[in-house]
Image: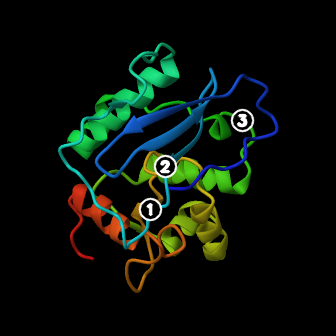
Amino acid sequence: MTTKKPLPASCNSKIQEKILSSPVGNILVTLCEEGLHSVGLEGDISDENFSPNESEVIQWVDEDNPAQTKVLTDCLSWFQAYFKDPALIDTVPRPEICCLRKSELGFRARVWQTLADTVGPGKVITYGALAARLENPGAVRAVGSAMRNNPVGIIVPCHRVVRSSGMGLYHGGKRQTMKKWLLRHEGVDKF
């Protein structure tokens, strides 16, 4: 899960920010009418202060302005399903993601799309296997770069990408505890 990233230059829609409460902390969602731009934790969450609250209700923090667009509704439904039981995400639509809507995807967007489409909850994939899945087995470092720059963490599950020799880094190595929590939440407990 990333911090706030700059918006794509090709998006000319009005941008809005919403905050969603979750077991891993408040999630800042940046979106337009067409899709999500970024999903990131609010505040400076690190291994030292990560304190999940599994009883947290998944809802928009600003209840005076309830979700009214399809993107907001899909985003809320997706996160509610994910934090209730990750296996349920296949029962709700994944929110549209602006950087994945282009007809010709760049390499990073292809990595994110492939990861989101092919590695479901409870599964992990190595950087090398993901590069091979993209028919570019030499692109292991480029896959790692795509993971570091993932603008929509959890929805595009970069926490499911691991090293062949172990878990690997998450959020620059500052959120290993969170990566372990997300994987355990999905039923992966080998790390």
| Residue type for callout 3 | Lys
Instruction: Tell which of 23 and 190 is nearer to you.
Output: 23
Instruction: Tell which of 20 and 86 is nearer to you.
Output: 20
Instruction: Tell which of 48 and 93 is nearer to you.
Output: 48
Q: Position of residue 175 (x, y in %)?
A: 43, 69
Q: Residue furthest bottom?
A: 165
Residue 93 visible in image: no
Which numbered disc flags the more N-terminal residue, 1 or 3?
1
Checking the image for residue 42, the label placed there is 2
Q: Is residue 163 above or below residue 158?
A: below
Residue 57 shown left or right of residue 154 in the figure: left
Q: Position of residue 113 (x, y in %)?
A: 56, 47
Could you say whether the residue bearing mark 1 is in a helix, strand or loop? Answer: loop
Residue at position x 63%, y 39% in the image: 100
Instruction: Tell which of 101 and 7 is nearer to you.
Output: 7
Could you say whether the residue bearing mark 3 is in a helix, strand or loop? Answer: loop
User: Separation of disc 1 and disc 3 at Cα?
Assistant: 32 Å
| Front of the two marks 1 and 3 | 1
Which residue position holds label 3? 102
Residue 73 visible in image: yes
Occupied quadrant, residue 103: top right
- Residue count near mark 2 (Cα–Cα under 10 Å), binned few <14, some 14–19, many ≥20: some
Q: Is residue 34 above or below residue 129?
A: above
